[in-house]
Amino acid sequence: MSTSPSFARLSHTVRSIAVGVGVMAGVGIPASFGLVAYQDQVAHLSYRTELAAERLAEYIYVQGDTWRFSENRIADMIGFTRIDGRQRTMRCSATCACRSRRRNPP
């Protein structure tokens, strides 16, 4: 049985569409879930950073110029927002006011 040119062209088109749909389902859907999870994590960390910044700004406003000498207090105040790794609090002059490292539990 011989195949006609129109049937061969239709078969090629259907297979091309099937490959495209397969690639979109296999790559596109997991990638979109990953993108949504990434954006959620960024929003969560941004919120925690804003909380720490507001808390620190209020403390600096109340303490005036003496806040620069209370490095331990600043580290305790922003400790609730700490994530794995290190965290630095910077002054307006781009110098480090406080550094803290999270210690891994034994």
Image (spheres, rainbow, N blue to C red):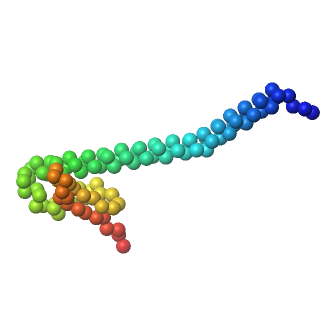
Q: In this view, does 98 lie above or below 13?
A: below
Residue furthest to the left in view is 65
Residue furthest to the top in view is 6
Question: Horizontal placement of 6 versus 38: left or right?
Answer: right
Give how far across and how far down residue 104 sits, in percent.
35, 68
Give how far across and how far down residue 90 sits, in percent.
20, 54
Q: Can residue 92 be seen in this view?
A: yes
Closest to the observer: 10 or 45? 10
Q: Is residue 46 above or below residue 72?
A: above
Q: Residue at x 41, y 44 (%)?
A: 39
Q: Residue at x 22, y 56 (%)?
A: 89
Give how far across and how far down residue 37 sits, in percent.
45, 46
Q: In which quarter of the image is residue 69?
A: bottom left
Q: Which residue is drawn at 7% across and 54% down?
A: 65
Q: Which residue is drawn at 12% across and 61% down?
A: 70
Closest to the observer: 68 or 104? 68
Q: Is residue 73 above or below residue 56?
A: below
Look at the image and tell me in which quarter the C terminus lies: bottom left
Question: Horizontal placement of 98 versus 106: left or right?
Answer: left
Question: Horizontal placement of 77 versus 81: left or right?
Answer: left
Residue furthest to the bottom in view is 106
Look at the image and tell me in which quarter the N terminus lies: top right
